[in-house]
Image (cartoon, rainbow, N blue to C red):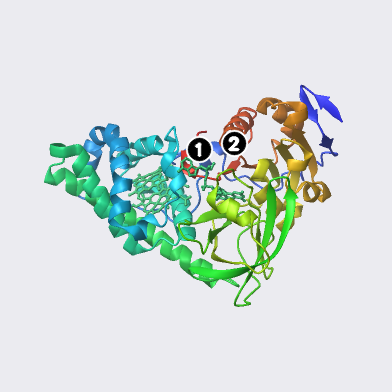
Amino acid sequence: MTSMRGVRLVSHRAMSSCPSAAIGYSTSLADTMSGCPSTAIVKSTSPAVTMSGCPFAAIVKATAPAVAPKVREIVDDFYPRMFSNSPEAKAFFNPANQFKEPPLQRMALANAVVAYATSIDDLSKLTGALEIIAHKHCGLGVKPRHYSIVHQNLMESIGHVMGDAVTPEVGEGWSEAVLALAKNLCELEAKLYAESAGRRGGWKGVKDFRVAGTRRVATDCVELTFKPVDGAGPIDFTPGQFLTLHLHKRGSTPRHYTVTNAPGKDYLQCCPKLVEGGFVSSALHGMKEGDVVGVSAPFGTFKLSGRPAVLCSAGVGATPMKCFLDSAPEQVKFVLHIDRDEAAHPFRKEMEASSAGTHFHYTDAGGRPEAAALVEGALKPYLAECDFFLCGPPPFLADMSAALKAAGARSIHLDVFGPALAQPN
Ligand SMILES: Cc1cc2nc3c(=O)[nH]c(=O)nc-3n(C[C@H](O)[C@H](O)[C@H](O)COP(=O)(O)OP(=O)(O)OC[C@H]3O[C@@H](n4cnc5c(N)ncnc54)[C@H](O)[C@@H]3O)c2cc1C
Ligand code: HEM
Ligand code: HEM
């Protein structure tokens, strides 16, 4: 055990140097981050969406500043309204998110609406954000008919909260804007649904899987193996994607879990961490072989770039890293992981067994690490050559990505186990 610059090194293998950059970097960090309403999101290369020529664009743009301060009120009115009008829509929404304080998501939404309204003539600026939303919606199983429910209730909420300020002209402008956004999302989602059903072992909607095995991989983490009840397989997906579990349990709403195994097997694995008071993680930790759950095919935008990679995780953020190590070990040059202690560290053995260099920091022994010191002490040799893949709690993501950026990292990709667009950067 050694320590450098205040960083306690629990395990630190030789840092293999990255292969020299024969690989060209076509985009700098600044390029990949620009244009997206949330700088936390690495822009994807999906087709641009536009709303050019929309007669309502000017109205939305002009009234956005008046609507923006009221968004919190509109959202607070909208959810209960939609839930009481439509049990079908309610069944998608995790009740735990409705009680979170501070209401990070809802306040972020206010900013997003202004961003949306001011870039309404060129929605291509929102492409990265729409892609993330569409992948989440596909895991949930959102269908075009649900957009009508949302539209109807949202317009009622806007009318209710804004009162006389909503002239027919203004109301129509916002209505058209939401419909246009919905149309873009529906089109993207139709494409994603078709792609995922067309992959080897792919399927549409929710399919039954049986628990074929459980393995404790850390104090609070169990890896579950699911096999399709219909026996179909092997199953392809993009490493880094999540499956969505739909428990056959009254009152349950869907949850996403990163797939932890490599593609091409006749099973899917995921690793839920037990969350105190958590509805789905508690149920999963009580599961036995033979239990049946509903599973949506894998979706999600977090994936390797094809360039040399450094994986940085904290806690259960180790799950996509396990998948990357299984799927593309040759691309991974270094693995950094932070956890409470050795016993709490999921997939520690798999990380150690890889040929990549490792640095594990345990906070019980070493205290909370400074992100800048971690970068300086362990990641510096990789800054020029590698892309960085981060997954862990929001403060970890915010601190590490800020420190990596300050140190000159060129490309940073974040996986967020919650609303990705609310992640501060
Ligand atoms: C893309 C993605 C990938 C993910 N991958 C993983 C993964 O690999 N492994 C993993 O473990 N997780 C992962 N997650 C997180 C996972 O989806 C769940 O959010 C997590 O398991 C918690 O779900 P739960 O049902 O157990 O808790 P929930 O029931 O959602 O509860 C969450 C918290 O809210 C509290 N709460 C619940 N109801 C209320 C209420 N009425 N009032 C106040 N507080 C309340 C609970 O006590 C708990 O602390 C991922 C998420 C995403 C978006
Ligand atoms: C002009 C239209 C809209 C824009 C630009 C927009 C944009 C955003 C953005 C950027 C976020 C991420 C920040 C955050 O997590 O809050 C967000 C969150 C969210 N939005 Fe919207 N949104 C719009 C309308 C809607 C509508 C119509 C719905 C209907 C269901 C909706 C449902 C949600 C949900 C569920 C979240 C996540 C909050 C949570 O998990 O609790 N939004 N929105
Ligand atoms: C124009 C319409 C809509 C917009 C703009 C919108 C926007 C969003 C956004 C921004 C998020 C957060 C994504 C993230 O940050 O990771 C989100 C998540 C979500 N959306 Fe939508 N949405 C719309 C329609 C719908 C509809 C029709 C439904 C279903 C009835 C729905 C259900 C949800 C749910 C349940 C989430 C929860 C987040 C999760 O699963 O992680 N949305 N949406």
Point 69% across, 49% down: residue: 221
Residue beneath the point at 60% across and 74% down: 229
Question: Circle 1 is placed at which residue position?
Answer: 423
Residue 183 visible in this rendered orientation of the protein: no
Whether residue 424 is visible, yes or no, is yes
Left or right relative to 122: residue 288: right
Where's residue 373, x and y in %?
71, 25
Quadrant location, the N terminus: top right
Q: Quadrant of residue 226?
A: bottom right
Tell me the tag on residue 397.
2
| Amino acid type, callout 2 | Leu
Left/right placement of residue 282 relative to residue 61 reads: right
Q: Callout 2 environment at 10 Å: few (<14), some (14 to 19), or many (20+)?
A: many
Q: Position of residue 301 (x, y in %)?
A: 54, 53
Secondary structure beneath dot 2 equals helix
Whether tag 1 and tag 2 are in contact, CB under 8 A, the answer is: yes
Q: Nearer the viewer, residue 330 or 233?
A: 233
Q: Is residue 284 above or below residue 98?
A: below
> Within 8 Å: ligand 3 and the Cβ of disc 1?
yes
How many numbered marks are there? 2
Q: Residue furthest top?
A: 5
On screen, residue 155 versus residue 169, left or right, reads: right
